[in-house]
Image (spheres, rainbow, N blue to C red):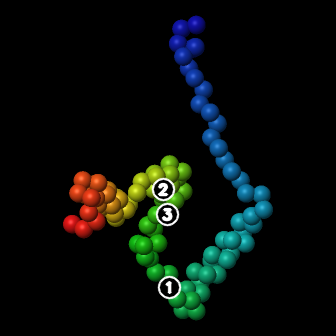
Amino acid sequence: MGFFMFNTRKPRGFQHNYIYVDERKEKLKQIEENAKRDLGMLPPKEFKPEDLRGKFSEHTKHLKKYKKRHLSFQTLLVLLAIAVFILHYLMTGKFSF
């Protein structure tokens, strides 16, 4: 037996092949768009760093849950101010500071 029984097989990788996509048509459309941009018929594509913001985290489930679960800093400050106001009212019995 030896070390043979400790050899575990790795699972097969997932491959998703689209059924209803014409790759030639999409590639031709991309080539046409690039040619029109080179000739000046379309405005050039501009790179904006704002376009990338949130693109990576929106595709992961755990980061979406993390963002939903945590309160923003401003919300925490407002809740703290309300708690201080309620504590002041309970100790003094007055609404004013």
What secondary structure is marked by label 3? loop
User: Which residue does the numbered mark 1 point to in the structure image?
Assistant: 44
Q: Please tell me whether mark 2 sits on a helix, a strand or a loop.
A: helix
| Quarter in which the C terminus is drawn | bottom left
Label 2 vs label 1, nearer the camera:
2
Instruction: Tell me the amino acid under the disc marked 3.
Output: Lys
Q: Residue at x 62, y 77 (%)?
A: 31
Around disc 1, counting alpha carbons within 10 Å, would you say few (fewer than 14), some (14 to 19), or many (20 or more)? few
Q: In front: 79, or 36? A: 79
In the picture shown, does residue 48 fall above or below 74?
below
**Residue at 45%, 68% in the rendered image:** 52
Q: Is residue 22 visible?
A: yes
The residue that label 2 is drawn on is 68
Name above or below for residue 34 compared with residue 66. below
Closer to the eye: label 3 or 1: 3
Image-based side of 60 in relation to 13, left or right: left
71 vs 36, nearest the viewer: 71
Q: Amino acid at mark 1?
A: Pro
Identify the amino acid type marked 2: Lys
Q: CA distance from mark 3 to mark 1?
A: 22 Å
Residue drawn at x 31%, y 57% is 86
In the rendered image, which residue does mark 3 sit on? 55
User: How far apart are labels 3 and 2 at the CA level?
Assistant: 16 Å
Look at 52% across and 59% down and name the residue there.
58
Kindly indicate whether the residue at mark 2 contacts the one at mark 3 (C-beta within 8 angstroms): no
The crowd level at tag 3 (other Cα within 10 Å; few <14, some 14-19, many 20+) is: few
Does label 3 or label 2 sit earlier along the sequence? 3
Give the left or right position of residue 89, taking residue 54 as reference: left
Q: What is the x, y in percent for residue 79? A: 35, 59
Quadrant of the drawing holding the N terminus: top right
Q: Is residue 62 above or below residue 78?
A: above
Name the secondary structure under disc 1.
loop
